[in-house]
Image (cartoon, rainbow, N blue to C red):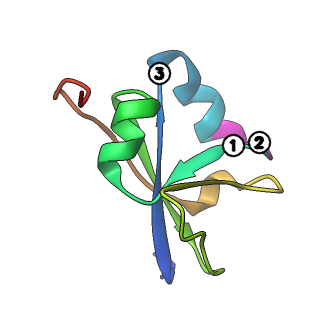
Amino acid sequence: MKRYKNYCYHGTTKNNIESILKNGFKKRTYFALHLEDALEFGGVYIFRVGFNSPLSFDWQFRVIKNVPAKRIISLKKYTIKKLK
């Protein structure tokens, strides 16, 4: 498995999983620096994705180009309710 310097999270719904696994993430996709933020704003299906470039200091950022599926480290469904 390839090592990355940074890991971020992308939350989504069940309907989007197959497309992401096949095609990766489209440009302008949002990623969160923390799992809790991905759960709150994305959905309970969370992708952990590796990046080597420096990341934003904001709680989330949007990529400027496509991110290939090979950067996906894991996919997990969380059963906790969204944070309030």
Task: Calculate the distance from the C-alpha at mark 2 to the C-alpha at mark 3.
Answer: 16 Å
The residue at 19%/23% (across/down) is: 81
Q: Earlier in the sequence, mark 2 or mark 3?
A: 3
Q: Earlier in the sequence, mark 1 or mark 3?
A: 3
**Taking 32 as reference, is 4 above or below it?**
below
Instruction: Label 2, secondary structure: give it.
Output: loop
Instruction: Label 3, secondary structure: give it.
Output: loop
Quick one: quadrant of the N terminus?
A: bottom left
Task: Give the residue type at disc 3.
Answer: Thr
The residue at 45%/19% (across/down) is: 14
Q: Quadrant of residue 25?
A: top right
Which mark's residue is nearer the viewer, 2 or 1? Answer: 1
Place of residue 70 in the rendered image (x, y in percent of width and height, measured from the top left)? 61, 59
**Residue contact at pointers 2 and 1, CB within 8 angstroms:** yes
**Residue farthest to the top?**
15
Residue beneath disc 2 = 26
Instruction: Label 1, secondary structure: give it.
Output: loop
| Label disc, if present, on residue 29 of the rendered structure | 1
Task: Calculate the distance from the C-alpha at mark 2 to the C-alpha at mark 1.
Answer: 6 Å
**Taking 74 as reference, is 57 above or below it?**
below
Tell me if 57 is positioned left or right of 79 in this view.
right
Please give the range of residues in magenta.
22-27
